[in-house]
């Protein structure tokens, strides 16, 4: 059964808070510790999450303010090298993640039912309602909070 926008938003808030709590609990020594099997260190996961939140927020803003905007893919595999994950501050990325997350919560708390049904045009998938794009972000937050737990146990 599909979740309502209110249910999705509640889960987004919960998952975002959970991600911040887990990320904040990681010691400075553990943040950039090499991981077995080529797994990203925790700091890279944090950087990835803020980059994803920027992309997701841009999608919501475009969908809310433009008629059927083209949705640009998030080329996540290019980000670690192209945006220098190894040299970025995990604390700065986490602070920006929190700020973007809170702003999106504020915006979507006030979105109408019609706003949630507005569409963006994905180059492969066609017209997708904002609710569906948002549902993906909700799961993304939960997945990476669990990834941080697994990396630091």
Image (cartoon, rainbow, N blue to C red):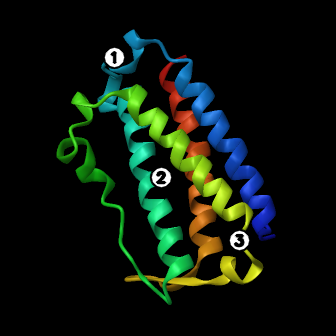
Q: Residue at x 72, y 43 (%)?
A: 14
Viewer-proximal residue, 107 or 35? 107
Determine whether the residue tagged by mark 3 lies in a helix, strand or loop. Answer: loop
- Give how far across and how far down residue 89 sits, in percent: 33, 27
Q: Is residue 65 above or below residue 6?
A: below
Answer left or right for 116 relative to 34: right
Is 119 located above or below residue 7 in the figure? Answer: below
- For disc 3, the neighbor class at 10 Å (few under 14, some 14 to 19, many from 20) is some
Label 2 sits on residue = 53
x, y percent for residue 108: 67, 64
Query: What residue is rendered at 37% in x and 83% in y?
Result: 123
Could you tell me residue 2's position as x and y percent? 77, 70
Asked whether the beta carbons under mark 2 and mark 3 sit within 8 Å of each other, the answer is no
Q: Earlier in the sequence, mark 2 or mark 1?
A: 1
Figure quadrant of the N terminus: bottom right
> Dot 2 lies on which element?
helix
Tell whether 94 sits left or right of 134.
left
Image height of 84 relative to 41, above or below: below
Answer with the quarter of the image where residue 54 lies: bottom left
N-terminal-most mark, 3 or 1 = 1
Circle 1 crowding by C-alpha within 10 Å: few under 14, some 14–19, many from 20: some
* Sooner in the amino-acid sequence: mark 2 or mark 3: 2
Q: Mark 3 or mark 1, which is nearer to you?
A: 3
Q: Which type of secondary structure does the marked residue at label 1 adopt? A: loop
State the mark number for residue 15: none
- Front disc: 2 or 1: 2
Pointer 3: what residue? 111
Q: Say which quadrant the C terminus sits in.
A: top right
Task: Write the residue at 49% across / 88% down.
Answer: 68
**Residue under numbered circle 1:** 33
Crowd class of label 2 (few under 14; some 14 to 19; many from 20; radius 10 Å): many
Q: Nearer the viewer, mark 2 or mark 3?
A: 3
């Amino acid at each position: 059964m599909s979740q309502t926008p209110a249910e999705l938003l509640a889960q987004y808030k919960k998952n975002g808070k959970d991600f911040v709590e887990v990320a904040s609990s990681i010691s400075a020594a553990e943040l950039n510790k090499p991981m077995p099997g080529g797994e990203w260190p925790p700091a890279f996961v944090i950087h990835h999450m803020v980059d994803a939140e920027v992309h997701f927020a841009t999608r919501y803003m475009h969908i809310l303010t433009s008629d059927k905007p083209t949705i640009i893919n998030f080329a996540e595999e290019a980000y670690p090298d192209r945006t220098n994950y190894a040299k970025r501050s995990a604390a700065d990325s986490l602070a920006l993640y929190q700020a973007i997350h809170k702003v999106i919560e504020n915006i979507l708390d006030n979105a109408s039912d019609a706003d949630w049904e507005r569409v963006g045009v994905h180059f492969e998938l066609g017209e997708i309602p904002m609710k569906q794009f948002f549902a993906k972000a909700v799961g993304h937050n939960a997945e990476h909070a669990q990834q941080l737990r697994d990396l630091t146990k």
